[in-house]
Amino acid sequence: QVQLVESGGGLVQPGGSLRLSCTASGSITGFVAMNWYRQPPGKERELVAFISSGGATNYAESVKGRFTISRDNAKNTVYLRMNDLKPEDTAVYYCNAGRGFDNDPWGQGTQVTVSS
């Protein structure tokens, strides 16, 4: 099974930016979509953004206009550019390949903390 590794998380002040990366151990082109999820402290995991194999994208309402998902198939990598970060964006961010099912490939998560 493809393994996913996230990177790029960290501590940032409100209004700041981060770019998360998710690099797969193999090709990502065979997956129907590549997804970014997040799990805020004490809350359920939620879908943040996805990009289909054809390049179509969609975003949670809470991040529209601030986050951008993109993919580089040649590098087996998906990115999440996050601008104008808010404290409520604080969460562990997870990369997923497929449809978000438990038996899909998932990364280990990367912590994003937005705080002054």
Image (cartoon, helix red, strand yellow):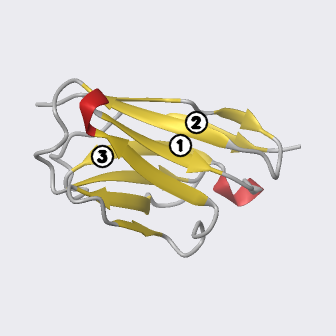
**SS state under label 2:** strand
The picture places residue 33, in percent across and down from the top left corner, at 23, 56
Identity of the residue furthest to the top in this view: 25
Q: Quadrant of the C terminus?
A: top right
Q: Is residue 67 visible?
A: yes
Q: Hey, what amino acid is under mark 3?
A: Asn
The picture places residue 21, in percent across and down from the top left corner, at 46, 34
Task: Please give the residue where the numbered disc 3 appears in the rendered image.
Answer: 96
- Taking 60 as reference, is 105 left or right? left
Who comes first in sequence, dot 2 or dot 1?
1
| Label 2 environment density (alpha carbons within 10 Å; few <14, some 14–19, many ≥20) | some
Q: Which image quadrant is residue 47 in? A: bottom left
**SS state under label 1:** strand
- Taking 76 as reference, is 18 left or right? right
The picture places residue 46, in percent across and down from the top left corner, at 44, 62
Q: Quadrant of the N terminus?
A: top left
Q: Hey, what amino acid is under mark 1?
A: Val
As drawn, 105 above or below 4: below
Task: Please give the residue where the numbered disc 2 appears in the rendered image.
Answer: 111
* Real-space CA distance between mark 1 and mark 3, rounded to the nearest whole angstrom: 13 Å
Task: Please give the residue where the numbered disc 1 appears in the rendered image.
Answer: 92
- The reply to whether the C-beta atoms of the residues labelled 2 and 3 are less than 8 Å apart is no
| Label 3 environment density (alpha carbons within 10 Å; few <14, some 14–19, many ≥20) | many
Q: Hey, what amino acid is under mark 2?
A: Gln
Who comes first in sequence, dot 2 or dot 3?
3
Residue found at x 15% / y 46%: 103
| Label 1 environment density (alpha carbons within 10 Å; few <14, some 14–19, many ≥20) | some
